[in-house]
């Protein structure tokens, strides 16, 4: 079973192809995992499709070989998040394979492998963070939320993610950006019946209104 995973909810575009054989285990076949220095939230549209094609080619796989798609659903900025979700749903419909959503904060938490409480925080811009508290890498303690750094309930806990590097200094720990390999591992763990965060519908987790708004009604012009 081949699972294609990708996430565009942060500044990074990250893609991985994971092979899972029920009863035998799983392994990453190929991945494109940019560093924080290479991330550019303005290029999600132009980077995602070539990244998927490159990962598939590196693994010697064709689209028809896919058994499932896993995609990060955020929270994240509207534009970048939409790129990943629209691509995942379009591929799922075209290939007739299921599409599973995964909370991007859960992906970062999963990658830590931590057994003690911590916080995950990603950059929400506007001097705010998307964040959630975790009891362990596999158990989220609070719902994802958005707000200023002062409202993050860290209370001396380690803080993981790009938002931690921006606002929490010595409390900041890696990883900074979500890994598609970790996303695929989480999805496979849930599909195989192991414990971990729930899989979600492939719908965006915005937490706040998009910056773009529909124009209001035109003002009436009073004749002079």
Image (spheres, rainbow, N blue to C red):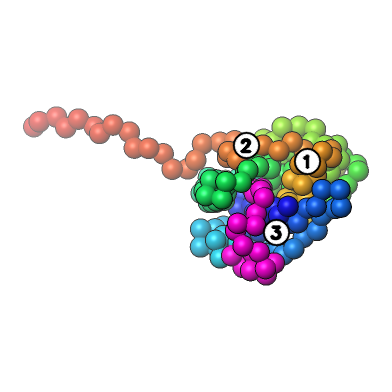
The image quarter containing residue 140 is: top right
Chain part drawn in magenta: 53-71
State yes or no: residue 149 in magenta.
Answer: no
State yes or no: residue 58 in magenta.
Answer: yes
Examine the rendered structure and indicate whether residue 133 appears above or below residue 19.
above
For the residues labelled 1 and 2, the Cα–Cα distance comes to 14 Å
For the residues labelled 2 and 3, the Cα–Cα distance comes to 20 Å
For the residues labelled 3 and 1, the Cα–Cα distance comes to 16 Å
Helix, strand or loop for disc 2: loop
Residue drawn at 8 percent across, 32 percent down: 224
Residue drawn at 34 percent across, 37 percent down: 215
Q: Residues within 10 Å of mark 1 (few under 14, many from 20)?
A: some
Helix, strand or loop for disc 3: strand
First along the sequence among labels 2 and 3: 3
Q: Would you say 209 lies left or right of 144 here?
A: left
Residue drawn at 86 percent across, 48 percent down: 23
Residue drawn at 74 percent across, 36 percent down: 198
Tag 3 residue: 17
First along the sequence among labels 1 and 2: 1
The image quarter containing residue 218 is: top left
Closer to the camera in the image, 4 or 111:
4
Closer to the camera in the image, 183 or 161:
183
Tag 1 residue: 190
| Numbered badge on residue 201 | 2
Residue 98 showing in the rendered view: yes
Instruction: Residue 162: give x, y in percent of width and height.
Output: 71, 53
Q: How many marks?
A: 3
Instruction: Residue 4: give x, y in percent of width and height.
Output: 66, 54
């Amino acid at each position: 079973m081949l699972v294609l995973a990708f996430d565009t909810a942060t500044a990074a575009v990250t893609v991985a192809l994971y092979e899972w054989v029920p009863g035998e285990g799983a392994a990453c076949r190929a991945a494109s995992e940019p560093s924080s220095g290479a991330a550019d939230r303005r290029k999600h549209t132009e980077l995602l499709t070539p990244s998927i094609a490159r990962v598939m080619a590196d693994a010697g796989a064709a689209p028809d070989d896919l058994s499932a798609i896993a995609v990060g659903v955020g929270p994240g900025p509207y534009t970048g998040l939409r790129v990943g979700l629209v691509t995942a749903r379009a591929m799922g419909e075209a290939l007739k394979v299921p599409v599973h959503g995964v909370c991007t904060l859960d992906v970062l938490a999963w990658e830590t492998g931590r057994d003690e409480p911590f916080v995950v925080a990603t950059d929400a811009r506007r001097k705010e963070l998307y964040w959630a508290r975790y009891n362990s890498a596999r158990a989220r303690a609070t719902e994802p939320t958005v707000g200023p750094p002062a409202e993050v309930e860290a209370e001396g806990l380690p803080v993981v993610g790009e938002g931690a590097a921006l606002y929490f200094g010595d409390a900041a720990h890696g990883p900074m950006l979500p890994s598609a390999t970790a996303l695929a591992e989480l999805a496979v763990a849930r599909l195989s019946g192991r414990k971990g965060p729930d899989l979600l519908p492939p719908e965006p987790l915005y937490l706040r209104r998009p910056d773009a708004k529909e124009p209001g009604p035109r003002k009436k012009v009073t004749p002079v």
